[in-house]
Amino acid sequence: MRFRTLICALGFLAVTAGGAAAADTSGEAGFQRCAVCHLPGGEGIPGAFPPLKGRIANIAESQEGRAYLVGVVQAGLMGAITVDDIPYMGVMPAQGASYDASGISEVLNYAIQVLDGDNAKPDWAPFSAEEVAGLIKANSVPTSQGSAMRRQALHEQYPELR
């Protein structure tokens, strides 16, 4: 597991080397940080990094799921999770220092529309910067452990998301 985390961290550093690219804030450009671990198509690596494709649109259907997704990007995620009966034990680094509310909304909208568009319902509402800012403010002390607790509560309320 340490090796996988090291590989992800090294890839993350390679993507971000040379400073932040301030000019391009599109969701696709922002997603390149995520793609280091979750891969460009969002399919993830079984047992190492969970998939976004086939899942993220379903999670974003509920208010609890939307809060969870924003919290994970903002504060990261640490601990054991299971996705499609595959266990994952690792750490997703917090991205809140890299993305403001607008950046988080763009990255999540890209992941839902482009990577998981087949699962997005026709009436799904894209994340707005205002919604994301409100969710961040409501979770005034975000932590990766807090993200894990929100995930557990989300699964208890919506078991089909496992």
Image (tube, rainbow, N blue to C red):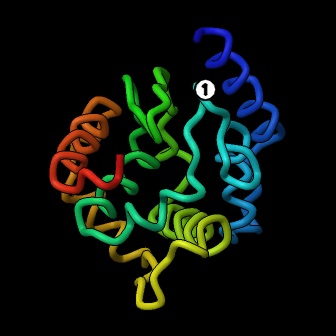
| Residue occupying image coordinates x 35% and y 46% | 162
Q: Residue 74 in the image: state x and y as whole percent.
A: 42, 48
Q: Residues within 10 Å of mark 1 (few under 14, many from 20)?
A: many
x then y, percent, for residue 73: 46, 49
In the displayed structure, does residue 14 sit left or right of residue 93? right
Closer to us: 115 or 131: 115
Work out whether residue 12 or residue 148 is closer to the camera in this orientation and state it. Answer: 148
Q: Quadrant of residue 127?
A: bottom left
Residue 23 at x, y percent in the picture: 76, 68
Asked which secondary structure carries label 1, the reply is loop
Residue at the extreme top of the image, as rendered: 2
Horizontal side, residue 149 vs residue 41: left or right: left
Where 82 falls versus 133 (above or below)? above
Tag count in the figure? Answer: 1
Q: In this view of the protein, which residue sits in the foreground, 150 or 57?
A: 57
The residue located at (22%, 36%) in the rendering is 149
Residue drawn 77% across the image and 30% down it: 11
**Placement of 96 over or under 11, stated as above or below:** below
Residue 161's x, y, as percent?
Answer: 34, 53
141 sits to left or right of 4: left
Q: Quadrant location of residue 124?
A: bottom left
Looking at the image, which residue is at 62% across and 19% down? 5
Residue at label 1? 48
Q: Quadrant of the N terminus?
A: top right
Q: Is residue 137 above or below residue 105?
A: above
- The amino acid sitting under disc 1 is Ala
Q: Residue furthest bottom?
A: 123
Front-lying residue, 87 or 123: 87
